[in-house]
Amino acid sequence: MASADTAVAPPPRVGLRAPLGGAALARGAATLWISVIVLIPIAAVISRGFDQGLGHFWSAITDREAMAAIKLTLISSLVVVAINAVMGTLIAWVLVRDEFRGKRLVNSIIDLPFALPTIVAGLTLLALYGQNSPIGVHVAYTKAAVVCALLFVTLPFVIRAVQPVLLELDQEMEEAAASLGAPNHRIFRSIILPNLTPALVAGCALAFARAIGEFGSLVLLTGNIPFKTEVASVYIYGRIETGDPSGAAAVSVFLLAISIGLLFALNGFARWRSRHERA
Amino acid sequence: MSAPRRRWRFGLRGVALFYLAALLIVPVGAIFVRAFEHGLGQPIDAITSPDGLHALWLTVVCVGIAVPLNTAFGVLTALVLVRQEFRGKALLNAAIDLPFAISPVVIGLALFLVYAPRDSWVGGWLMGNGVQVIFSVPGMVLATIFVSLPFVVREVMPVLQEIGTDQEEAAKTLGASPWQTFWRVTLPAIRWGLTYGVVLATARALGEFGAVSVVSGRISGSGATQTLPLYVQKQFESFNVAGAYAAAILLALLAVAVLFSMNLLRRRSVREGEEGAGDGIPPAPAVFVPQPIQEA
Amino acid sequence: MAISVKNVTKRFGAFVALDDVSIDVPDGGLTALLGPSGSGKSTLLRVIAGLEQPDSGQVLISGEDSTDTRVQDRNVGFVFQHYAAFKHMTVYDNIAFGLKIRGEGTGTTRERVRKLIDLVHLQGFERRFPNQLSGGQRQRMALARALAVEPRVLLLDEPFGALDAKVREELRTWLRRLHDDVHVTTIFVTHDQEEAMDVAEQIVVMNHGRIEQSGGPRELYENPASEFVMGFVGPAHRLGDAWVRPHDVEVRHEPNGQTIEAMVDRIVHLGFEVRVELTLSDGEQFSVQLTRDEVDQLELAEGQIVFVRPRAVRVFQMG
């Protein structure tokens, strides 16, 4: 194998797999894996959503209960993203610019919502803010519960997107602005924020995609009351349980469209930026 | 420092810490309190009950299959995406991010539509050959693989990009075969990114709820297809609160262990100069902002 | 006095960056803070700017005690080594920033920015972004930005340190000419003694957080107050207990009672100058700087025995 390699002109940038066939095999295997595990099942959902025609798709989406669930999902997710944009930036700021004992510990628990199973997340919020709340805050079975749970699971997104940018930020720019007379709030608005915006937008987009699909933390905390606290994912679950996979698929396609749309937008945005940035 | 500066600083810090405490720290602390409210007995009984142990076992099986498979294919995919050029590469790269963005319930539905015993793409044929996927363990394993798929790929790719092909080329000139190069040069170079990815994938797999719930046919109420997260829900809905909390604690402790190792690994990899930027504590790249492939 | 620093001390943890430092900078003057890394020169500049607070001592700007004034209110122009360009703003917006902060009208702003762009020769670059400029252009933009608000003092922190040698030289000349035109009190920090000698009227030599000597370039070169200043400001060699500049040494073929015997090891031609490396009679290595003509006249060759006599030596008391 090795000698055959030196006899032929080396293929460009095929780093590791010397035999050309090996590279194609690897490519094929990777593509097959993604297709079987991810792409084909997703295709099944899209196909099922439309398999009874556009009309049926539309009526499944505009079903009263479905609409209520979608509306609740979208509004709560937007509210949560707005809160995260502010609080996430604030927390990232404190973690990067401030010094206090225990900061390292605080920094590591930010990732807890990533590591914690969503069902446990719901249970923890229920323990403190549910029916038997020790501090008298009762949000269980209300719309507030939806916001609460979503805030929990989306906590790390904006923070972790903004933190590296803040770390890399040239503090001399802020000093220059100060030497030119800019007060602190102006420095934040004109110097820091514009440089954070791309990361902030990305973090918010990811948080939104996460929020609209959230299920496990909502299942126990919200009571899943149709028209009141039922979100889209719970509605879909209900449709599967009652033997209406087409209806479930229709609403799923709606959610998929938003998620995939966001992903592609982010990807495109990142590509545009890397093209326009010179050293 | 001037007084107004100090006020701002403490104010911001206070708001941040209060928010984190109210949303994160205190609730998680609360389940620990709740679980052991009535002593150690109930929680331990719940976990060591046949259902509880079975749920634990099933969780281990799902994770034990999904993570190694995703690790192997993750490294393979990372190598393909970083070291090769081909049409459709951008699409493959984007597809990796899908499990991040899709609702777990939709994932469950997707698997259902492909593998259900009736009225699905291949489920009927599989049933005919004696393989049941949905409402059975293989389905749950598939769901677990789906949700934990991207982590190893996404952690290994930047490392591969960073180290470049120099070392591998040097190995080739010294006569190493592709496998030897991979085993002795590439793998050691990516080991911290790889481990970090495995830890993240494991955490995700352990905690998966929605997709597994759909494919397990929780409706049927049988304990035979319950992972630990599903067990938590079942116990809670059966008013066996202590049992629910006990299982939740177990999962929470595992999550904390995951956090701990994430931290350890992050610091290790920075010290060994594997990850590029930042002095001090680099934040976890667990938020995968979709990146286009670097045209190096 | 435009700037007076009185007994300023600044510590970072256990490290003493400035140790009871006092200097006076005359109005309209061009002063260099010269010293090696860690000498405290940048810290002193930042204390003057208000970017650092001293632990003790005072900073007076135009006679007023500004020690507790915020940097925003001191009206000092600051130029950073790595430009600190607002990378998300155009060249125009960068320069206009200080004016916008002060609420200047669009008309006035445009006029001033235009004048400054002409001054720094960046015509045509108004709409560009900093990452589209070369290092030298970015630094000129940074200077224009600092000058836009008509500061009382212009402070530059190793302004040419990040640039290529040729660009550095150009900008040095350009800075001096700018100072001639604009006449704002200017202090710049450098570790390059040639740059300080070339540009500044007054040089403050610092070491280990203290001022070693302050004066004009010629004075520092010819009358250094300490070993450190002598060695830092120009080439210097030990000759026994004394220090001598290598071009202050006469080379003869015969002794005359004041000479030391030496053997020529190597003759190195560096263009106009020639460095002659010798070994002295006591075994010590030494080198002497001569002109080409002198070397030709003496017909020096390697291996020759010659006699050297220092024309001017300095001896510094210990302690």
Image: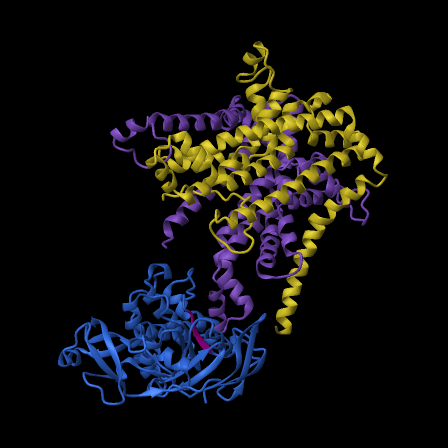
Chain colours: A purple, B yellow, C blue
Horizontal and vertical percent position of residue A222: 72, 38
Horizontal and vertical percent position of residue C78: 44, 74
Q: The N terminus of chain C is located in which quarter? A: bottom left
Q: Residue at x 52, y 50 (%)?
A: B271
Taking the image as drawn, is residue A76 in sight? no
Of C50 and B7, the residue lying toward us: C50
Of A256 and B89, the residue lying toward us: B89
Task: Name the main secondary structure of what is drawn in magenta.
Answer: strand
Q: Is residue A269 left or right of residue A233?
A: left
Q: Residue at x 51, y 61 (%)?
A: A192
> Exactly how many numbered labels are in the figure?
0
Horizontal and vertical percent position of residue B140: 62, 25
Start and end of the magenta stretch?
C76-80
Q: Is residue C37 left or right of residue A153?
A: left
Q: Is residue A260 left or right of residue A228?
A: left
Question: Image quadrant of residue B131?
Answer: top right
Q: Residue at x 29, y 68 (%)?
A: C165
